[in-house]
Image (spheres, rainbow, N blue to C red):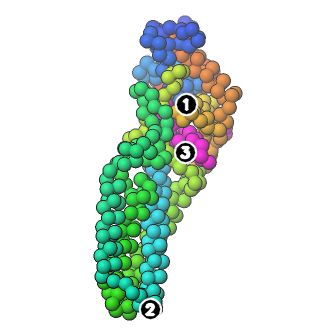
Amino acid sequence: MAEEDAGLGGSAPTHPNAVKGADGRWQTPNGDALPVSASDLERYTYCPLSWHLAATGTSGKSEAIEEGIVQHQAIHESIMDLKGHKFHTQRNLLIWQWWFSIIVILFIDTIAFRYIDDINLNVLEFSKILAIGALSFLLVGVTALLVPWRHAIGLNRPFLPKKEGHVDHIDPIIEPRGFMGGWFRGGLLETFMLVSSIVLALHSSALLFANDREQASYVLAFTTVGWTLLASMMLRRALKTNEMAQRLAEQNNLSMDDEVSYSDDEDKAQLLIDDDTGLRGRPDQIVIIDSEFIPVEQKTGKVPKRPHDSHRLQALAYAHLVEKATGRAPPYALLRYGQDNLHQLSWDEAAREELFDLLQVVQGVMAEGGAVRNHERPGKCQHCSRRHACGASLV
């Protein structure tokens, strides 16, 4: 169809049953805005005929596409490795901090058992009280790990507004989606309970030897040394994972303070949708930078001298979708070519106007047809992955 219609005013409509609403926007017969993905905007800007071929089922064929898929997957895996190493660093440092606190307590106890004079205290009874306390803390800590108590008291309200048929696309800060307990992901309460149980149990055991203060101090000193060795090992692991995380952050043009809250190849990565305009899409990543949700679009292949308009508009589309999903406008979107070529695209009124104008044009062509080649550049056709099915190709 594209071959026949290209010379007769353009291609046929892809949604011939669309109707124009009172606001001037094209809609389906059901009243929904015509769906347009951010990738549709990218393809249409590159060449409307290439977009039409894709919209009517023509798949792209080129080595660059296959290579791009491989490179894109490698980028996603690198981002996931970064998230994993940062998580393990935080976890190991948290363990080390609590273990160091235990070391300090044990050291103080060692000095006390060795040098403080006897006090009038029933050591055996006090040891039993500490043992009961340790067991109580342990039971509460394990229960907090297994039971989603935050959900029961309403602490895990979705961070994003929910609509019928939609899901929250970015994890809540207090309790992530699907969370059913967990030491580090849940918070400090579980940590406090379990560490307190350990400390009380150690004190209870040590007090059993309190009739011989010198013997008790030796037991505590030996325990302190052992705990110090364990803490040193945990600190070493934290430093190692932190070093790997820093290297991955540099490779992805991120700082260690930036958080990746979304990656399009994750199983939980949902489609971002704006029902009002019909725009939808999955950004490659959403990164939290200076408390702002910033969409990132990754492009593989040859690095251009300046961002292509097609890529720029795709990234701006993701900025709008992030704003719609979070209720907060990102100050900019990021467009990345290769390892070191990063462009910051302002998300302002001029960008909004440009994006919505293009969106309206694409929806109009979907409803009325008329997609034609928008250039006279043989080189562009040469690199088009759908030129094998295009009757208006210049090569």
Identify the residue under disc 2: 117
Q: Are marks 2 and 1 in contact (CB under 8 Å)?
A: no
Say what secondary structure mark 2 lies in.
loop
> Viewed as shown, does residue 249 lie left or right of 150?
right
107 shown above or below 212? above
Between the residue at mark 2 and the residue at mark 1, the CA separation in whole angstroms equals: 68 Å
Q: Mark 2: which amino acid? A: Asp
Asked where in the image residue 220 lies, by quadrant, the reply is bottom left
Residue at position x 49%, y 40% in the image: 159
Between residues 347 and 47, which one lies in front from this camera angle? 347
87 shown above or below 239? above
- Alpha-carbon neighbours of circle 2 within 10 Å: few (<14), some, or many (≥20)? few
- Residue at the farthest right position: 350
Between the residue at mark 2 and the residue at mark 3, the CA separation in whole angstroms equals: 59 Å
Identify the residue under disc 3: 287
Q: Which mark is residue 324?
A: 1
